[in-house]
Amino acid sequence: MQHINIIGIGKALPSNEVTASMIDKQCNLAEGTTLRITGLEKRYFLKDESASTLMLKAIYQALDNAKLKVDDIDCIIAASATMQQAIPYNGAGVHRLLKPKRNIPSFDINMTCLSALRAFDIASNLLETYPTILIVSCDIASIGLDWSDIRTAGIFGDGAAAMIVQKSTQGGIVVSNFETHSEGFEYCQIEGGGSKNPPSAYHGDYNDLAMFRMDGKKLFKLSAKILPDFIHNTLKTKGLTLNDIDYIVPHQASQASLNHMVRMLKIEKRKLIDIFHNHGNQVATSIPTALHELFMTKDLTSGQRVMLVGTSAGVGLGLVVWEVP
């Protein structure tokens, strides 16, 4: 077991609340269309603030929660799917925002929607070197949405979340597992911004390559096929079943995916942390934001097991079972 504890957690949402009705009007759709298609009542889009403002709010909330200050941090892991700019890396940007008095190392982990989960897993192996680690995710999905495709654009939201972790004497990561199924590589893409399609070599409207594209049907079909066995087989390696799990914190991919997870895994809905209806899919920020909801709404006790699980573009699968210290 990798002994790791979450000693502080925070989240931040933009002040700009966008309801399903507002999107209906924006896209000239009949009232109720967006809600019916997406199941998302409201989400929050960045408007008057900056991504930096959101990150700082989430980080300082986590620090206050942990009763720590910036200079108590030994390492910063930026775990976002989106970036404020291509270079420098996100971690350097977080470091610059925090203005620490000491030289705190930083780096990025990007596994799109599973970035924070992968960062949590990796952090558990770094605590001997870095006793206090900050993991922060901030995703502004709203800037890359194609509103001609309401089934895709309509499910996303913006936000930030932060976790502070330290080594524990008991509890921690019972099991972790990650897989890649690249036959689904093209199901979720932003094709521009890299060496494959540089602006200098592209003839036409580059905005087309800057938009997020998703083949929802193919992605759902592949995920439904591979995720159940991935979950059961991973748990089985430690002699566990879903009956041994107290809470499930999934990536908030879509309302349909969450509903399907309840059905296909035959789990009690009370175990599932579902915040999709008022947050949407916040990409990498989804899992830590849902984990924040768990911390704020449930009385977690030592020995309880929390399963964090999801999929990412690629297609990646990820699962961590964390036992509360």
Image (tube, grey):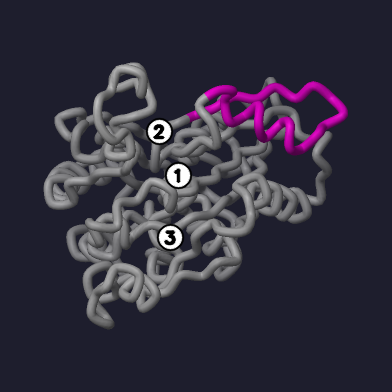
Q: Are marks 2 and 1 in contact (CB under 8 Å)?
A: yes
Is 14 contained in the magenta span? Answer: no
Q: Nearer the viewer, residue 44 or 198?
A: 198
Which residue lies at the image location 60% right of the left edge and 47% below the top edge? 51
Q: 225 left or right of 68?
A: left
Three-letter code for the amino acid on which mark 2 is drawn? Met
Three-letter code for the amino acid on which mark 3 is drawn? Tyr
Q: Where in the figure is residue 138, as x and y percent of width and height?
A: 55, 45
First reached walking from the N terminus: tag 2 or tag 1: 2
Q: 246 left or right of 100?
A: left
Tag shown at residue 102: none
Is 108 contained in the magenta span? Answer: yes
Pointer 3 residue: 247
Gap between marks 2 and 1, in whole Å?
8 Å
First reached walking from the N terminus: tag 3 or tag 2: 2
Q: Nearer the viewer, residue 271 or 36?
A: 36
Which residue lies at the image location 45% right of the left edge and 37% below the top edge? 115
Pointer 1 residue: 284
Looking at the image, is mark 1 or mark 3 nearer the viewer?
A: 1
The span picked out in magenta is: 87-109
Which quadrant of the structure image shows residue 197? Answer: top left
Count of number-bearing discs: 3
Element carrying mark 3: strand
Tag shown at residue 111: 2
Element carrying mark 2: loop
